[in-house]
Amino acid sequence: MSLRDSRQAGGQGTGPRTARPAVQVVAVTGGKGGVGKSTVAINLATAFARLGRRTMLLDGDLGLANADVLLGLTPRYTLAHVIRGERRLEEILVEAPQGFTIVPAASGIAQMAALGSTETLGLVRELATVGADLDALVVDTPAGISPAVLHLTQAAQHVLVVVCDEPTSITDAYALMKVLRRDHGVGRFRVLANMVRERGQGRRLFETLNRVTTRFLDVTLEYAGEVPEDPWLRRSVRDQRPVVDAYPSSVSAQALRSVAEAADAWPAPKGTRGNIEFFAERLVRRAAPVLEVVR
């Protein structure tokens, strides 16, 4: 089903669909690579679609695309073609079998990995034209604190920070939040503990991070839950299918569905942080100019 078809049908999920005044935009980030944020992002998008939400997944890892690989897809065109002016954004969209639309990034192209602030902000605004009827947008950000990471994260209404039980994961998540708070005014983060080995470990990781941020940063953290380490999740990655779709009764699938159901009800922020938010005009209920992607 195409994005156009899903608009006409009112979504493809199994749950009831209710009207939403603003798009639920969730940036899945983490600061450090290897924490499983791309897997989390893909499963969130799948779970949103199953809830009946018209959903789009933006692969924000502009130079090292992961989403299409994890879903077993081979896009003909990517964001690299858009940036070069060879295709319009609407022409590169790919429909995932799970019922959501993907904006595929490029892989192995240095120009995309080093995309500047102007191009990234242009992309943010361009998405408003192709996603006008969306209910949910999931942004899978790259690792690190490059301009693309910072601007894509700042532009989201909700920031989901994925961490795991490694010291570098906690320190890199802290560094990311510090930069986003200091330089971009982002002051609220939700923390998801991934690959936990025992019940309660995620809460302990959250408390560790929360103690440090409470002492040194002026930010608010909220606990988003924990995803257990699960052989069925690893198998789903090998199968190139989201675990919530391939093995819905597994413990990781149940945890990720719970996160998605909670995220679906997260309240929209009041007002905007300026003119660089996804679908900002729908947040403030007024028209906003859409800038072209810089070519």
Image (cartoon, grey):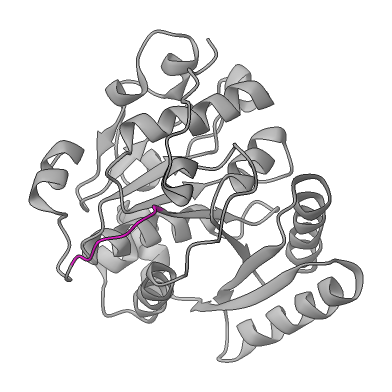
Name the residue furthest bottom: 199
Give the tally of numbered discs.
Answer: 0
Q: Which residues are magenta?
A: 17-23
Residue appearing at x 32%, y 32% in the figure: 130
- Any part of residue 136 in sight: yes
Q: Is residue 19 left or right of residue 65?
A: left
- Any part of residue 104 in sight: no
Residue appearing at x 60%, y 64% in the figure: 162
Asked if residue 22 is among those painted magenta in the image, a careful observer would answer yes
Q: Is residue 168 above or below residue 215?
A: above
Image location (x, y in percent) of residue 194: 56, 71
Residue appearing at x 78%, y 55% in the figure: 181
Q: Is residue 228 above or below residue 54?
A: below
Image location (x, y in percent) of residue 231: 41, 73
**Magenta span: helix, strand or loop, mainly?**
loop
- Quadrant in the rendering for residue 132: top left
Name the residue furthest front: 286
Looking at the image, which is closer to me, 211 or 130?
130
Residue appearing at x 20%, y 40% in the figure: 3
For the N terminus, which image quadrant?
top left
Image location (x, y in percent) of residue 78: 40, 24
Asked if residue 110 is among those painted magenta in the image, a careful observer would answer no
Looking at the image, which is closer to me, 269 or 64?
269
Q: Is residue 229 above or below residue 18?
A: below
Image location (x, y in percent) of residue 167: 80, 68
